[in-house]
Image (cartoon, grey):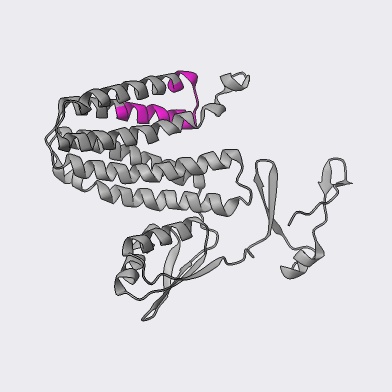
Amino acid sequence: MLMKRKLVKQGLRALTITIPSEWAERNNLKPGDEIDMTEIDNALHISPEGKMSLKEIAVDISGLLPRLADRFMARSYQKGYDKITLKFDDPELMLAVKNKIPELMGFEIFNIEKDKIEIQVISKQLDLDFDTILRRGMLILMEMAKTCRDAWKNGDKKSLENIFHQDYDVNRFLYFCLRELNKSSKIMNFGMSILYYLVESLEDLGDELKQLGAILSKINPDKDILNILDKMNEMFRISYEFFYKPEKSKAVRAFKLNKEISSLIDNALEAKRKEYIKALISIDFSNRIIYHLTTMRLDTLKELSGENN
């Protein structure tokens, strides 16, 4: 509901507004109470201190496949639900839900019955920093990409097979970031939408690198594909650096690397066997996601905005 309020001058510089009495009564607020105020670009979000309402959902997942139950849990968590109650008709569905909980930071199982399970966040305000968690997720993804190249070159099949353990941590960190974005903003503006898209894409990248590791573990090293993996890792490093410190030279280098990698993949696809083609397709998909880190942040370049460095 849109509400308009006039700004009232108080003192030399301060401006004040009144809040609706109905909202204050509904949240049991009285003079002297403190409220939380969050700045999101040009908007201010006001909420009662420590009195955020519990966002709940109750769903009957009977008839779903376990994998779809897994995805439902991930999406419900990302959308910001604090309590999830699920009814089911198959023990395999309960098992899929239970196995997903460790990937949902702050969530615990509160109750399990014969045909129902209740999951709830143990803290409404998880004491975690969004930027730190996002950066940690990116670093793990970079390590996954490096492992694909190094372990394959060295014939270390075990490390390639175990990449899925790293994807587990990527999910935990990036699911949390998506949840924070959904819970912190009532209005999804352009900048926030781009960031949300990037985090979603990075979570997909974790899945793809996990798949790539599994593919590479079954085939012998190939010098042409190793060269492509070298360049993909270079582009990942440059794109990561650009994301946190946008510089024109890095954007140009990422663009050139992206074109070069695409060309090398096209050439290799004509000459490789089926097993290697699968790896090349996976690398191509990973490469396009990594490139988003640069293209989706070009607006942050000071040179393009007319600002001086």
Question: In the rendered image, is residue 102 in sight?
Answer: no
Is the residue 7 above or below the residue 220 in the image?
below
Looking at the image, is 1 positioned above or below residue 282? below
- Report the number of discs: 0
Percent coordinates x, y for residue 48 in the rendering: 68, 61
Q: Residue sitting at 20 percent across and 34 percent down? A: 277
Task: Give the quadrant of the C terminus.
Answer: top right
Q: Is residue 141 above or below residue 180?
A: above
Q: Looking at this view, is 34 or 301 the one in front? A: 301
What's the residue at 80%, 58% (across, down)? 19
In this view, the residue in front, 194 or 142, is: 194
Residue 179 appearing in the image: yes
Residue 248 is situated, as x and y percent measured from the top left of the image, at 49, 19
The quadrant in which residue 31 appears is bottom right
Residue lying at 43% horizontally and 41% vertically, measured from the top left: 135
Q: Which residues are magenta?
A: 232-251
- Name above or below for residue 177 compared with residue 274: below
Q: Quadrant of residue 115?
A: bottom left
Query: Residue 40's x, y, as percent?
Result: 64, 45
x, y (%) of residue 254?
Answer: 40, 23
- Residue 272 left/right relative to 289: left
> On the rendered image, what quadrant is the N terminus found in?
bottom right
Left or right: where 70 falls relative to 80: left
Does 230 lie within the magenta span? no
Q: Is residue 233 magenta?
A: yes
In which quadrant of the rendered view does residue 256 lie? top left
Give the residue at the far bottom of this rendering: 114
Dominant secondary structure (helix, strand or loop) of the stretch shown in magenta: helix
Closer to us: 13 or 157: 157
